[in-house]
Amino acid sequence: MRDAYGREINYLRVSVTDRCNLRCLYCMPEEGVPLLPHGDILSFEQIEAVVRAAARMGFKKVRLTGGEPLARRGVGDLVAMLGRVPGVETLAMTTNGTMLAPLAAALAAAGLDSVNISLDTLDAARYRRLTRRGDIADALAGVDAAIAAGLAVKLNMVVMEDTAESEIAAMRDFAAGRGIALQTIARYSLQARKADGAEYDRPPPCSSCNRIRLLANGVLRSCLHSDIDAKVDFADIEGSIARAVGSKPVHGAVSSTKSVGQIGG
């Protein structure tokens, strides 16, 4: 389906939890973010219902995000449920990879097609500093397991103010050596006005935006850089999705109410 500005909207990002096992500098404060009560988080059945409605409306790609999606207990069951939804051509996940190694094969068997793994450096000490608590060995094991499971793998590298060109080059070599893709992401804040630039691969320009987001508490957000959102009406899911698509602004501005860590990127 198309929004008011003629953009085809066919991509639904689904935050399955607001919990995360890391505290990345560019995502959330060291103490974390205020967590939703468990009772406010959508059930797998509710998520499936929204995805089925979206697929009927022409959405072809679904990506599971968090927080950290692998922190959600039983997320493999959700992958299996969504993998059976007619019309969904690509079922993807974005993860920090630190819990992926023992789960990758089962997720692929359940229907996951691709995975984006957050990896901003190959230096163990720098990784620890950027994530505030992560072990790069766990993330690298996740990369290898995803490749071995036959998943399409892409690395998400957030380019920080102190990231050296040599570090980006090292990441490109690392990805190329494993036959996977590297995606560079400009560090951004939702509290700063959205800027479209061509230096890095992401964020994408607003003119080509094709997505809306379902947050873990059942709120549909039409634009990452905005405060436009509305709770899903489970008596009229398709109407809720249509209204979210219809409310997409021509260009992102700022989000004064949510941080990246509360939305899922």
Image (tube, rainbow, N blue to C red):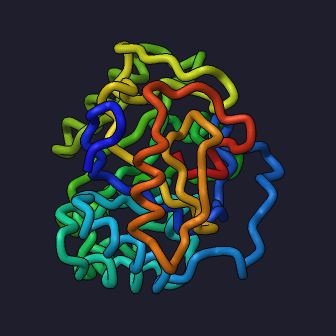
At a point 37% along the width and 56% down the height, the residue shown is: 12
Compared across the picture, whether 196 is left or right of 55 comes to right
Compared across the picture, whether 106 is left or right of 176 comes to right
Compared across the picture, whether 13 is left or right of 67 comes to left
Q: Write down the quadrant of residue 215 in the picture.
A: bottom right
For the question of whether residue 166 can be seen, the reply is yes
Task: Tell me residue 162's x, y (percent).
Answer: 59, 17
Depth check, front residue: 112 or 99? 112
Using the image, determine if residue 95 lies above or below residue 178: below
Depth check, front residue: 241 or 103? 241
Task: Tell me residue 247's x, y (percent).
Answer: 48, 43
Q: How many marks?
A: 0
Task: Tell me residue 138's x, y (percent).
Answer: 49, 59
At a point 50% along the width and 60% down the height, the residue shown is: 214
Depth check, front residue: 83 or 112? 83
At a point 83% along the width and 51% down the height, the residue shown is: 31
Compared across the picture, whether 76 is left or right of 10 comes to right
At a point 55% along the width and 72% down the height, the residue shown is: 233
Depth check, front residue: 144 or 85? 85
Using the image, determine if residue 48 lies above or below residue 238: below
Q: Write down the quadrant of residue 165 in the picture.
A: top left
Using the image, determine if residue 189 lies above or below residue 27: above
Task: Tell me residue 127's x, y (percent).
Answer: 57, 40
For the question of whether residue 128 can be seen, the reply is no
Q: Write down the quadrant of residue 157 in the picture.
A: top left
